[in-house]
Amino acid sequence: MTASAPFRVVFVCTGNICRSPMAEIVFRWFAESVGLGDRVAVKSAATGDWHVGERADQRTLASLSGHGYDGSGHRARQFELSDFAESDLIVALDRSHERVLREWAPTESDAGKVVLLRTFDPDARDELDVPDPYYAGPEMFDEVLGMIENASRALFRQLEPAIRSAV
């Protein structure tokens, strides 16, 4: 990251309609809330192509809205190999995504960009996967959003000094 380039992060889950859009929107909110929105480029993607072009799941949008976030502009997309070169950090929402992303990485350096979101959450203990709420009810979406908020807050706090110093 140079003084003129924003820090680029992409959050990745299975279909890019539940977990990763939540993480994208929450992380962007953290950056904007402290005046660093222009210093961070945040996006999200899927490991699969099932929902490309679709809006986030209605339960995702409802959970986000109920907690003061706006996910209405989200459209699902699939992770592309170019995302490795275009990202400083690639954040997987569970270990299956982490494994796939590391397998896709064209270089060891690119594989080194892949991290698991909940490793930043001190309350996660050994529960490092953000569970997929897709087959659950709306209350699970709220629970998942809480996990994502906690881990994203910790991740942002860790990155914030470097992002600030690049201004």
Image: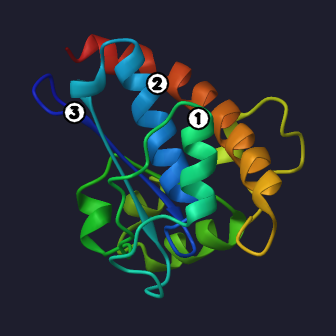
Rendered image quadrant of residue 70: top left
| CA distance for labels 3 and 1 | 18 Å
Q: Which of marks 3 and 1 is in front?
A: 1
Q: What is the crowding at mark 3: few (fewer than 14 residues within 10 Å), some, or many (at least 20)?
A: some
Viewed as shown, does residue 30 lie left or right of 62? left
Name the residue that disc number 3 marks: 6
User: N-terminal of the two: label 3 or label 2?
Assistant: 3
Tell me which label, 3 or 1, sits earlier in the chain: 3
Element under disc 3: loop
* Residue under the point 60% across and 66% down: 98
> Marks 1 and 2: in contact by CB < 8 Å?
yes
Residue 104: % across, % down: 44, 79
Image quarter in which the N terminus is found = top left
Alpha-carbon span between mark 2 and mark 1: 8 Å
The three-letter amino acid code for the residue at tag 3 is Pro
Q: In this view, does 23 lie to the left or right of 137?
A: left
Name the quarter where the C terminus is drawn.
top left
Residue at mark 2: 30
Residue type at numbered disc 2: Phe
Color encoding of the figure: rainbow
| Residue at the spot of label 1 | 152
What's the residue at 60%, 50% (across, down)? 62
SS at mark 2?
A: helix
Q: What residue is drawn where x is 69% and y is 62%?
A: 94
Gap between marks 3 and 2 measured at Cα: 15 Å
